[in-house]
Amino acid sequence: MADYVQISAQISEATRKRLDLYARETGLKKSRIVEDAINAHLDALDEIPPEFITPTRLVVDDESWEFIVNAIENPRAPTPALRELVNRLRNED
């Protein structure tokens, strides 16, 4: 029989609600869902070279945030090369 330990983690209220709902819908215990999720994540990390792993959350400073917001609110026109690529991809379908 495997040894078990208890861990503690802070998660968002939204994540807790999703976990509760999934546990109710599937009948699985939350501890099993969490352990399966951790193992799946770690297995995936073992398969991917470290240089290709991108953090799921990025932290940016105020100046970078303003740049990002401005780029979203005022997108630049697509370049001719981008237009050509999109047209080529559309024609492949």
Image (tube, rainbow, N blue to C red):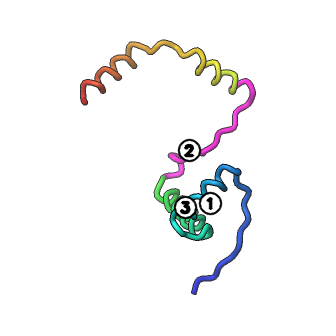
Mark 2–mark 3 distance (CA, rounded to whole Å): 14 Å
Identify the residue position indicated by label 2 in the image: 54
Compare marks 2 and 1 and give the one earlier in the sequence.
Answer: 1
Q: Between label 3 and label 1, give the one nearer the viewer.
A: 1
Q: Quote the CA–CA distance across marks 3 and 1.
A: 23 Å
Q: Of 53 and 91, which appears nearest the observer?
A: 91
In the image, residue 65 lies at what x, y percent? 69, 27
Q: Position of residue 41 (x, y in %)?
A: 54, 58
Residue at the spot 56% in from the left edge and 44% down from the top edge:
54
Determine the residue located farthest toward the bottom in the rendered image: 1
Query: As shown in the figure, which amino acid type bears the numbered disc 2?
Result: Thr
Q: Quadrant of residue 58?
A: top right
Q: Nearer the viewer, residue 91 or 23?
A: 23
Name the element at disc 2.
loop
Q: Farthest residue toward the left?
A: 92
Residue situated furthest front in the rendering: 24
- Over which residues does the magenta segment extend? 49-64
SS majority, magenta: loop
Instruction: Name the residue located 55 percent from the left edge and 61 percent from the top edge.
Output: 42
Residue 42 badge: 3
